[in-house]
Image: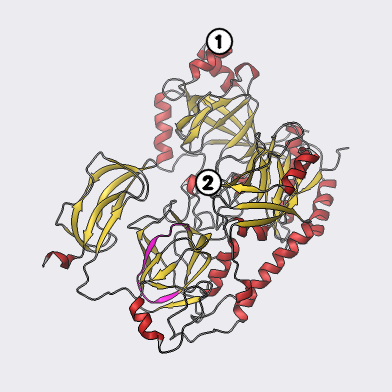
């Protein structure tokens, strides 16, 4: 039996439904199951809901939906949720050119981990990562599942410019920058795939709950994908799978 | 009115509506007007839907040319708005007969003004909103603040009649001053703070720091003690959340804040008082007062109901009267003041020589100079190309005329506000 979530007030127009206070795959799955259930209910007055590592924040219009009614709906919905993960998830393959100019910190990551660059790439590209949530900037995925052996602290001095598509490591996290920005993550590679495009629907490539695999590619394959992306013809490899029991 | 031409962008002038909802789970901030109540009021006065796109003006206002007749309304902070030199009465709809130049003499009260025009601003919808999200370069007018040479299109008016002189009832017009008490709902992570920390937060007086912006209002004052650490496992945020970083200083998240955050949030500013905080200037004093959720929601309901009183108020002056007492906005309707009005207005005869300095809206690199002294240019003609924030954009002639001195050369780095090109009336060289 799963304990009921805690309801926390986030002002007069949002409620936080908290399932735990740690980064945990099962807690995160419960957040997404509740989000899907609430979305399926299409309750008038719920403006939107945002899944995070361990809680779902529900933005609502108190002029339309009284707080008591919302809280009752959340409690009731959470109470009848199936245990486990949502019934299906997507796995998305992301081509990455590792090292060199595309990944200027790969050598440092390898040195800190005490292995050669090829071993870092094998470990990074060998894993499957869970998108716990999106945040920080439009389209940015918080990915869990980085092998501990290549966890590396952030740069002491952040770069003023990190190009869009850069794949980085910060502590036990790995991520991809959706747009040019300053940043302190150690950059090990770059993908030509566009993670955020406001003209697309949905605008972000990822959503919470997706699995991500990195596929090492050389310059020629990178350039070919980049051309497809530029022509708005690129579709990443996405597989939809059903969750196990 | 078909467009607003930007002659000078001012400090930070952006297109905003009520924000971009429905995309926070993709990491897209809500954005939108900082003072949503003032935006709603401005749109109501202008005969628009409450959520129409308007112009948010910050402290040092822009110079805007309205290109034809129409109806405008200015609400929010009093930044000393003038139309062709005459004070524009705030918090009411104002008829613009033949277009004109809107200028701002400086802050008199508050921080942000809202300019709504009948028909709204017709910039493209991006993810369902016309708001500008500056740090992602998304929405609004090309994803950025307005700058000299921009031409912002105005939408077609609805079939609602345009009525000048509609106003917000006097008792509802806020005065802001420099001391702000913000009501807060405690949580979601008030349990991450010591009892003393909560006490200090609720009894302390904080000062708004100059680093405040559309993302957050930074405050300095008595540090707020965490029980253990300032860090939490990141969770969702709302506009108005008071997060406390490791140094114990509170930051109130505002319109452009990220959708998730990793600092404990002690409380959330009530929706009605977020509008008030949006009008606080650096150096202003801020205190927090605890209220329950139900009370905060009742306040929100009352504030929305107040907007309905705008529609019920009768126009309080005939549209023909055009002169107002500057301090109170009261009409000076007596015929004796007609002479005064003429004296106040800027002479606009054909003999007036008018020189404009076209300035850089932001710091950047001059990539190329497109004109030479003496060139005749039409409105919109590119004068120089400026590279700023990785984008090359032309700085265009805000009006037709003849190029006077060119004050920059290719490769020159210029500061924000630096004069680039002198633009004279075409006629001024004849004599």
- Marks 2/1 in contact by CB < 8 Å: the verdict is no
Kindly identify the residue that appears in the image at 13 percent across and 64 percent down.
B429
Q: Mark 2 sits on what residue?
A: B210
Q: Quadrant of the C terminus of chain B?
A: bottom left
Same subunit under labels 2 and 1?
no
> Image quadrant for the N terminus of chain B?
bottom left
Task: Name the side, left or right, on which B300 lies relative to B6.
Answer: right
Q: Position of residue B298 (x, y in %)?
A: 75, 64
> Which mark lies nearer to you, 2 or 1?
2
Q: Nearer the viewer, residue B202 or A4?
A: B202
Q: Name the subunit of mark 1.
A: A
Q: Please state which of residues B371 and A67 is positioned toward the viewer in this rendering.
A: B371
The chosen color scheme is secondary structure
Stretch in magenta: B58-71
Residue with the mark numbered 1? A115
Outermost residue toward the right in this view = A1
Q: Would you say B205 lies left or right of B105 here?
A: right
Q: Percent x, y for residue B252?
A: 63, 47
- Tell me if I can see residue B263 in this picture: yes
Describe the element under mark 2 as helix, strand or loop.
loop
Compared to B235, does A70 lie above or below? below
């Amino acid at each position: 039996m799963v304990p009921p979530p805690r309801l926390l007030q986030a002002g007069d127009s949002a409620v936080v439904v908290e399932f735990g206070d740690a980064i945990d795959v099962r807690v995160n799955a419960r957040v997404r199951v509740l989000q899907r259930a609430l979305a399926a209910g299409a309750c008038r007055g719920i403006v939107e809901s945002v899944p995070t590592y361990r809680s779902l924040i529900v933005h609502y219009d108190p002029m339309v939906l009284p707080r008591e009614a919302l809280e009752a709906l959340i409690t009731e919905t959470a109470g009848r949720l199936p245990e486990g993960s949502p019934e299906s998830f997507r796995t998305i393959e992301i081509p990455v050119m590792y090292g060199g100019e595309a990944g200027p910190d790969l050598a440092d990551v390898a040195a800190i981990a005490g292995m050669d660059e090829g071993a870092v790439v094998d470990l990074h590209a060998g894993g499957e990562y869970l998108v716990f949530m999106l945040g920080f900037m439009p389209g940015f995925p918080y990915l869990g599942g980085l092998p501990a052996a290549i966890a590396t602290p952030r740069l002491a001095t952040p770069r003023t410019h990190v190009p869009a598509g850069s794949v980085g490591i910060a502590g036990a996290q790995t991520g991809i920058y959706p747009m040019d920005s300053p940043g302190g993550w150690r950059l090990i590679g770059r993908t030509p795939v566009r993670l955020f495009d406001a003209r697309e629907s949905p605008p972000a490539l990822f959503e919470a709950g997706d699995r991500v695999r990195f596929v090492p590619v050389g310059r020629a394959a990178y350039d070919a994908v980049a051309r497809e992306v530029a022509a708005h013809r690129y579709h990443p490899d996405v597989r939809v799978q059903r969750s196990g029991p | 009115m078909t467009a607003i031409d930007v002659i000078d962008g001012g400090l930070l002038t952006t297109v905003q509506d009520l924000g971009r909802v429905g995309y926070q789970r993709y990491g897209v901030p809500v954005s939108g007007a900082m003072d949503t109540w003032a935006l709603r009021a401005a749109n109501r006065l202008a005969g628009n839907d409450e959520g129409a796109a308007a112009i948010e003006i910050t402290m040092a206002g822009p110079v805007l040319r309205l290109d034809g007749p129409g109806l405008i309304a200015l609400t929010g902070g009093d930044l000393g708005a003038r139309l062709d030199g005459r004070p524009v009465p705030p918090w009411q709809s104002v008829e613009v007969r033949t277009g004109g130049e809107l200028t701002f003499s400086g802050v008199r009260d508050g921080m942000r003004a809202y300019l709504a025009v009948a028909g709204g601003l017709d910039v493209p919808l991006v993810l369902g909103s016309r708001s500008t999200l500056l740090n992602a370069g998304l929405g609004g007018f090309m994803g950025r603040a307005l700058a000299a040479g921009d031409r912002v299109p105005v939408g077609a008016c609805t079939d609602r009649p345009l009525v000048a002189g509609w106003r917000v009832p006097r008792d509802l017009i806020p005065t802001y001053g420099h001391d702000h008490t913000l009501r807060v709902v405690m949580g979601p992570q008030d349990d991450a703070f010591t009892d003393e920390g909560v006490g200090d937060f609720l009894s302390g007086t904080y000062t708004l720091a100059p680093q405040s912006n559309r993302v957050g209002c930074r405050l300095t004052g008595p540090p707020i003690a965490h029980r253990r650490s300032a860090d939490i496992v990141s969770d969702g945020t709302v506009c108005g959340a008071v997060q406390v970083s490791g140094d114990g200083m509170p930051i109130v998240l505002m319109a452009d804040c990220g959708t998730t955050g990793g600092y404990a949030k002690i409380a959330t500013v009530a929706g009605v008082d977020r509008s008030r905080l949006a009008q606080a200037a650096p150096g202003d004093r801020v205190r927090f007062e605890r209220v329950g959720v139900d009370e905060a929601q009742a306040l929100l309901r009352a504030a929305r109901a107040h907007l309905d009183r705008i529609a019920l108020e009768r126009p309080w002056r005939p549209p023909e009267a055009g002169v107002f007492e500057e301090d109170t906005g009261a009409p000076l309707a007596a015929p004796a003041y007609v002479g005064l009005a003429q004296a106040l207005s800027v002479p606009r005869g054909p003999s007036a020589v008018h020189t404009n300095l076209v300035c850089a809206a932001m710091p950047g690199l001059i990539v190329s100079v497109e004109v030479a002294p003496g060139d005749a240019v039409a409105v919109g003609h590119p004068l120089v190309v400026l590279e700023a924030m990785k984008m090359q954009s032309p700085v265009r002639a805000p009006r037709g005329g003849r190029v006077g001195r060119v004050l920059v050369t290719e490769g020159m780095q210029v500061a924000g506000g630096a004069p680039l090109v002198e633009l004279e009336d075409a006629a001024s060289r004849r004599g």
